[in-house]
Amino acid sequence: MNAGTKFAIGAALIVGSVGYLMASGVKQTGQYFLTPSELSQKIALDPSFYNVGMKVGAHVVPGSVTRDLATRTLRFQVTDGSARYAVLYRGLPPDTFNDSVEVVVEGRLQKDGIIYATNVLAKCGSRYEAVPKA
């Protein structure tokens, strides 16, 4: 076997190994980003979709926020106008969180219909939008 053939085989093994590691890493850490409506459709099509890591982007339903300061538990509902889900989050919410803000909730939907959040991100549009040009 000449040197060129050995080099080609070695390069193919390295490229194949790196490709496999990349694909398996993305599969393990990849998450869905869904709206509540898309999540409802996904559940309707695939009832085994529960307990899958995902991010849900929606608005907090006004008046749905309840806080338990002793246990640092935050309960609220999110909606996109057509579907609604309850969220349970244990921890401190972001400073910009209120009952009418747009949020991204990272967590898992369980069979009880509640999204158990591991992270909540709140958007504050007025603070971060560009100034309109006159």
Image: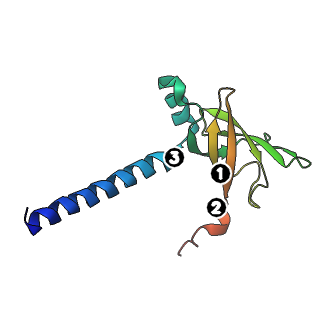
Mark 2 Cα shell of 10 Å, populated few (<14), some (14-19), many (≥20): few
Residue appearing at x 38%, y 54% in the figure: 22
Q: Nearer the viewer, mark 3 or mark 2?
A: 3
Q: Residue 54: give x, y in percent of width and height.
A: 56, 43
- Given the image, on which type of amino acid does mark 1 rest? Glu
Residue appearing at x 72%, y 49% in the figure: 100
* Residue ranking furthest to the front: 1
Quadrant housing the N terminus = bottom left
Q: Residue 48: give x, y in percent of width and height.
A: 53, 26
Q: Which residue is denoted by mark 3 in the rendering?
A: 31
Q: Residue 76: give x, y in percent of width and height.
A: 75, 41
User: With respect to residue 105, does 37 lie above or below?
Assistant: above
Q: Quadrant of residue 123?
A: bottom right
Residue appearing at x 25%, y 57% in the figure: 13
- Given the image, on which type of amino acid does mark 3 rest? Gln
Mark 1 Cα shell of 10 Å, populated few (<14), some (14-19), many (≥20): many
Q: Which residue is denoted by mark 1 in the rendering?
A: 102
